[in-house]
Image: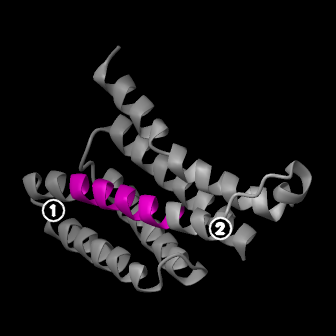
Amino acid sequence: MTPNKTLKILAYISMLPLIFALFLALYVALEGPAISGYFINFARINSYIYAHSYGALLLALFAGIQIGQNLQAQHHWYVIFNFCILGLAWLSYQSFADALGVTLLLCCWLAALIIDVNAQNQHSFPQWYGNLKIKLNIWVIILLILLVLING
């Protein structure tokens, strides 16, 4: 298996905690406890906690990789933008485990997507890696939007 395929597989596996958070939100929203008779304590708040903490961790990982790549390539504006995203992600923890915090984190992911699209247009990293990051950004954004809408 090539390193490209290995990284792609690992990147998609890294989305599993966000999918689990969405499952918890759906479980409560679709009256899962009433149907199954099994209640997951604090499932709604846990879905926000999982999505918020893991989404911020994943964002920090991707922003850190982007900062490292841009320091090598002398793209200092991207470094500044990614540090700003990290600061905003940290500020999102001020309203932890609620819709406001997850929405702010969602805005950080949208900004990261814009930065990644712009960096790919500037050829800051290989094409396959840029496509992978953009796809992952879009999937995380979709999962966070669904989570905010379901938990509303």
Rendered-image quadrant of the N terminus: top left
Q: Is residue 4 above or below residue 44?
A: above
Q: Is residue 23 above or below residue 146?
A: above
Task: Specify the amino acid type for callout 1.
Answer: His
Task: Identify the disc placed on residue 42.
Answer: 2
Task: Specify the amino acid type for callout 2.
Answer: Phe
Q: Which residues are magenta?
A: 51-66
- Tell me where residue 10 sits by quadrant: top left
Residue 124 location (% of width, % of height): 24, 50
Q: Secondary structure at mark 2?
A: loop
User: Residue lying farthest right?
Assistant: 35
Residue at point 35% right, 31% down? 7
Task: Identify the disc placed on residue 52.
Answer: none
Q: Secondary structure at mark 1?
A: loop
Colour mapping? one colour
Residue at point 60% right, 56% down? 21
Residue at point 60% right, 49% down? 20
- Tell me where residue 76 sits by quadrant: bottom left
Q: Residues within 10 Å of mark 2 (few under 14, many from 20)?
A: few
